[in-house]
Amino acid sequence: MAAPGLMAAVARPDSVIAVTVRKFEFVPHEINVIRGREVTLAFNSIDFVHGFNLPDFAIRADLVPGRTTEVTFRPTKPGRYLFT
C-alpha cells in the first residue's frame, strides 16, 4: 500500500476536507491543497483511536471514534508531505 500524503500545488476548491480513518487506511489516500490557502482536515475514525501526524507542519492529533477532529494548517511551499 502506498503511503498517504498531501500535495501542495494543485487547486482544490474545498477549505474543509472530510477524511475517514479506519485500521491501516485514511480515505482519501491523497489530498491536493493550494499553497498559501488555509485548509481544514475533518477526521472521523470509524473503529478505534488513531493518531495523526503531519511532521512537516508540527501537527499531531488523536482521532477518537464518534468525534470529528479538525486539524487546520496552511501549506507554505509546494511539495509532497507524508502523514501517518
Image (spheres, rainbow, N blue to C red):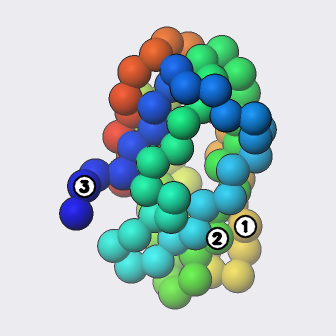
Q: Quadrant of residue 33?
A: top right
Helix or strand or loop: what does disc 1 sit on?
Answer: strand
Name the residue beneath numbered marker 2. 44
Given the image, on which type of amino acid does mark 1 rest? Thr
Q: Give the CA distance from mark 2 to mark 3.
A: 21 Å
Res. 5 in view: yes
The residue at the point 76 percent across, 40 percent down is 14
| Percent position of residue 62, x then y | 54, 62
Specify the quadrant that holds the N terminus.
bottom left
* Quadrant housing residue 15: top right
- Asked whether the viewer can see residue 74, the reply is no
In the current view of this chain or complex, which residue is farthest to the bottom? 47
As displayed, is residue 4 above or below residue 50? Answer: above
Q: Earlier in the sequence, mark 2 or mark 3?
A: 3
Callout 3 touching callout 1 (CB < 8 Å): no
- Residue drawn where x is 39% and y is 43% of the image: 5
Type of residue at label 2?
Asn
What element does badge 2 sit on?
A: strand
Circle 2/circle 3 CB separation < 8 Å: no
Q: Is residue 4 left or right of residue 75?
A: left
Q: Specify whether 27 is left or right of 36.
A: left
Mark 3 Cα-neighbour bin, 10 Å: few <14, some 14–19, many ≥20: few
Rendered residue at 36%/51% (across/down): 4
Indicate whether 12 appears above or below 41. Answer: above
* Relative depth, front residue between 3 and 64: 3
Residue position for label 1 = 68
Q: CA distance from mark 3 to mark 1?
A: 25 Å
Callout 2: 10 Å neighbours few (<14), some, many (20+)?
many
Query: Which label lies toward us, 3 or 1?
Result: 3
Of the numbered discs 1 and 2, the one sitting upstream in the chain is 2
- Per the image, the residue denoted by label 3 is 2
